[in-house]
Image (tube, grey):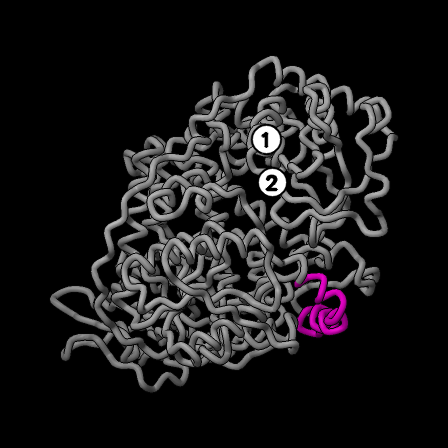
Amino acid sequence: MTLRAVWAPDAATAARTAGWDDLLATGHADEAAPLHVNAALAARHPDGPTVAYWSDPAWQAALDTTPIVLTATARELRIELPPVWRAEIHLAWDGASLLISSDLRTLAWAVGARTPDPDGAAAFLTGERWTRGLLPSLFRGVLTLQPGHAAVIRPDKTIRVEATWTPHRDPAFASQPLEASTVQLRDRLDDLADRILTRHRRVACLFSGGLDSTLIAAALLRRAPERVVLLNVGSDLGTPAEERLRDRFLHQYGATSEPVDLPAKPGLVAALRDVNAMTALPTGSPFAAAFEEILAVAHADFDCDAIATGDGGDEVFAERDELLVDLLARHPRALPTALGHHAVRSQQRGLEALKRAHRTLRYLRGHAPAPGRTASVLDTLLGDALAERVISARARALHADRERWLQGWTWSALGSARRAAAVPEWEPASTQAPGMAVLSPLVDAQLIAPALALRRTALQPSVAGFQSKWLLRQAALAWLDPQIALHPKIGSADGTILQAVRADEHGDLLDLLGSTTAQHIGLRLPSEADRPEHPLWHGEEWIRPAALTAWLDQPAPRPQQPSVTLSSPLAPPAMERPPLPASRHRRRASRRHVVALAVLNVAHQLRPGTSVPPARVTAADPRLGETLTDLARRACAFPLVNGASQPMSQALAHFLRLRGRRATAVCGVQEGRPGPRYWVETATAHVDVHGAETPLTPAPKMTGAHLSNSLPTERR
């Protein structure tokens, strides 16, 4: 279903509709119609302006049901968009008439826009579009209005944009205690599950076993288990931890999950081409081929008309370095503990994170220029002209962020909202199920609100066993076994998929990113990229430009999305909230142990050049890991302590040996990541205090014969 409308402010001139002959006039019988709409819009014209409403049944099933509203007179047109992240509207002038559409390709073809807009491509590649309300689209001559904003357009073609989604004006913003936000988040997720099951007759759930997808599965199963189908990726993808967590959840809820095996062909690159032929905007992720198959199975085999995902959990709820800016500005006493947590996660010194936060805060307060940005692997794909436009786009986005910060937003809340708005770029899509609604409840604006309202000091590790996404985990404790809700982040199989792309699809990938379309955008493949071992192909940074190229390379308009049948949900079963796990009240390490670990860390930084043995294949020890992680975080609050995996693992192994335990720091690799990683091995298990999100394995061509429990003086 596509919105199409024309605003013709000049009554003396017939509206130019660019071939949209099915549009209906909405004016009074005795005057020229200022607004022409297609039948998909519900329009009314009381005494006063003409008002039209539109929403898409394939949108996120949001708690805020406000549709797109067009209010037209001969003097101005106001377009207001709800904070639903796929509710973008595209605008283009055709003479004195303004053409409006919810589908960019439909509008581009109507006005003859065929040339990619480098500024629009740069805005897309930065991934920071939401902060700026009105942007150039991917085609020259077409503008895009972002969700959560309103635009007032006048006949002289001037456009004034304002933000209408303003959670920072809520009196509870950034001041709510953890308990209040926890209850609010859980209640709103429960209401949203009700709404999803009201709109759709049968809902598939993309279920990996991680916290985010498991929480969504629980919310749906509590209400109507007979109308929910759990699907997980088969073909031996995923980690053993994911499989164990899936089994535990399925046993708790008495449910089953259907594995969906992936076809041997066509692969990720072909999937990017296929799905971007029918999506409204460029879409892509390492799991594009897997998602395409899962949606096809959900539609054809299980008769589902919607699929729910856990996308957005990391983007909205994970604690990031942005939090340090807020603590430095408002709660400096809370900094030491937070610095230790972020130093261990980022494998850096806490002082370095503090310096970055201080530079950012000085910029926000107008005391310093914008902080510099570290070059990324993506920059190697940008031609000179596009690179300059990307730099300008980032500068404009940073300036817009600063303006919002000055209005009362917190820096971490801005980051969460910006990342939530980008989630549709990697949501599932399939050419075999083009009308299926894809729902990501964790990025619903009303569900984000409790996270934005949470007091910033509640996002620091104040308890032993603190895990990333602490608010989401506390909300999940009412519905999930604590061993699921508080399980450390487990990652996924993206490293395995990217390795397969390097091995089997490298030529196809070079053809896509070296195509004429890619050159028109401004992308340039470096000569060294011909090698599959080039660092560019080891991460996910290339997927966004690849999706953009595939989308612009396929000009066919996407299929119309049919409406879906509504049904009523059943009453949810009553479930009691379990008591908080013991880890919340666990005794923390003593201060003398923290000081001892800090001294050992500095000592191992001063002893470079000694070898580190390879890892064996051992199981993780969550109990010991929780204790050592808390110890490492607190030690990292000291200025000279380095959170990097090598010195910290060596210091922890040394600390354990001084306390009479057999332990050593070992070297291995993290699946899908270049370079070595280090962790601690005891006689029977391993501990990684840095929270690796994909499996840790022995380094290639290294054997366990080199492993030793020798004295610290002989081992780095």
User: For the residue carrying disc 2, how many other residues have a C-alpha within 10 Å: few (<14), some (14-19), or many (20+)?
Assistant: some
Residue at the (39%, 73%) spot, across then down: 99
Q: Quadrant of the N terminus?
A: bottom left
The kind of secondary structure element at disc 2 is loop
Q: Which mark is residue 288?
A: none
Residue at the (50%, 75%) spot, across then down: 430
User: Farthest residue in the top direction?
Assistant: 592
| Closest to the observer, 73 or 621 | 621
Asked whether the viewer can see residue 234, the reply is: yes
Q: Is residue 63 magenta?
A: no
Residues at discs 2 and 1 in contact (Cβ within 8 Å)? yes
Q: Is residue 500 magenta?
A: yes
State the CA–CA distance, disc 2 to disc 1: 9 Å
Q: Which mark is residue 629?
A: 1
Give above or below for 135 relative to 14. Answer: above
Indicate the amino acid at tag 1: Thr
Give above or below for 160 relative to 463. Answer: below
Viewed as shown, does residue 510 lie left or right of 308? right
Q: Quadrant of the C terminus?
A: top right
Give above or below for 209 relative to 577. Answer: below
**Image coordinates for residue 180, horizontal then vertical, percent:** 30, 35
**Image coordinates for residue 197, horizontal then vertical, percent:** 29, 65
Asked whether the viewer can see residue 358, the reply is: no
| Residue named by callout 2 | 691
Which secondary structure type mostly characterizes the magenta part of the structure?
helix
Report the magenta residues as a range: 497-518
The kind of secondary structure element at disc 1 is helix
Q: Could you tell which of marks 2 and 1 lies nearer the N-terminus? A: 1
